[in-house]
Image (cartoon, rainbow, N blue to C red):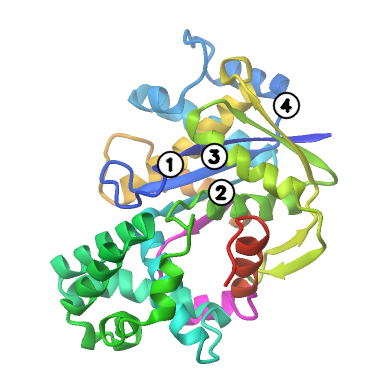
Amino acid sequence: MECFRIDESGYTGFDLLNDDQRFQGASAIAIGDDDAERLIKQHFPKLQATELKYRALSRRQSNHPRLLALMRDLLGEFKCVTYVCDKRFMLTLMFVDYAVEPYYYERGLDFYANGQNYAMASMLHMAGPALLGKPQFERLMESFQRAMKEKTGEALNELVSAARTTNWRQMPEVIGPLAQYADRDCLSAIATPDLTTDIAMIVLTSLITRMEVMADGPYRVQHDQSKNLATYHALLQRFINHNETAEFRATEITTLSFPLKLTDVEQVDSKKSPAVQLADAMVGAAIEAGNTLAGLRTGGLDPEQLLPLYADDQFIHMLPSIDFEEQRRFRQGSQGGELIDYLAANLMGFKR
């Protein structure tokens, strides 16, 4: 049976405003340990460490050509996909989903049609600091994250107060439900028990949509035994255990159907699995490229050399975009709202 090895990077749980880790991502690659060991020995014949670790290798400029050659082989010869997102943008997107969308939902508007939520979140993320006031926007996002975590009346009142102290009339369609109305439906959504800003489910869903397409039949997943991946493990098991029949169109190139072809998930010791080590290399390279392009890190692989190695269907990113027409076309006919409701009710235990 085909086996995808996965690894993650940048996971900070509910805290999407973490200054040290701006990006979160995960990679999946269908490669066996024999092929993985061969590639590691081919590209790093003098490696003395007990396992290949991308971050340690990337610190040395002399390793960059070897890392690029390794990535070229992995992307060119094996089924693989990498997902990367800007966590601050994801928090903004969640703000739109829970602090804005319920207001429109109760008025019969499909906020997810053609990616309208994505366009609004992009506008809020990119223009919000200038239009709403930078310190006021930062307070708004901090208050929203706190309210999503604590669920208390005090935290919800602070969120409404934060919205009202912004220049919200510059973006009334976005901030108005909270600032003008303190909308009960929005506050109720934010106060939903167990609902957090943890985006592990979003990351996994994106990986699974591609693994389901790439897999020729039933497949399994292996991952490292890290504490962070324990969360991913539990979520993967929920996907596996869900046997109802359903299908959703996410974008023009992705559809997610249940039950999945994924049949099993297993934790392994990465020191004993060269294949899992290469999953670490893939996600490490992508996160490093994001940090470099954002001006947050220097000294890693050159993104201009790395990113052209990916085929269009090998790299998924969730970043703000001001090309609203292109995003509308890409998400036209999307059943994003239905998929969110389905996953919330059937895999996470939430209901609208």
In primary-sequence order, the first of circles 4 and 1 is 1
In primary-sequence order, the first of circles 3 and 2 is 3
Question: Label 1 vs label 3: CA separation?
Answer: 10 Å
Above/below status of 83 relative to 76: below
Q: Which residue is mark 4?
A: 32
Which quarter of the picture shows residue 287? top left
Magenta region? 315-335
User: Residue 80 vs residue 259: left or right?
Assistant: left
Q: Residue drawn 41% across and 23% down?
A: 57
Q: Residue drawn 70% across and 22% down?
A: 33
For the residue marked with disc 3, what is the amino acid?
Thr
- In front: mark 4 or mark 1? 1
In primary-sequence order, the first of circles 4 and 3 is 4
**What quarter of the picture does the N terminus occupy?**
top right
- In front: mark 3 or mark 2? 3
Secondary structure of residue under mark 4: loop
Q: Position of residue 61 (x, y in %)?
A: 34, 26
> In the drawing, what numbered circle is on residue 310?
2
| Mark 4 Cα shell of 10 Å, populated few (<14), some (14-19), many (≥20) | some
For the residue marked with disc 2, what is the amino acid?
Tyr
Question: Label 3 vs label 2: CA separation?
Answer: 28 Å
> In the drawing, what numbered circle is on residue 231?
3
CB atoms at circles 4 and 2 under 8 Å apart?
no
CB atoms at circles 1 and 3 under 8 Å apart?
yes
- In front: mark 4 or mark 2? 4
Secondary structure of residue under mark 2: loop
Q: Position of residue 311 (x, y in %)?
A: 60, 52
For the residue marked with disc 4, what is the amino acid?
Gly
In primary-sequence order, the first of circles 1 and 3 is 1
Q: Which residue is mark 1?
A: 11
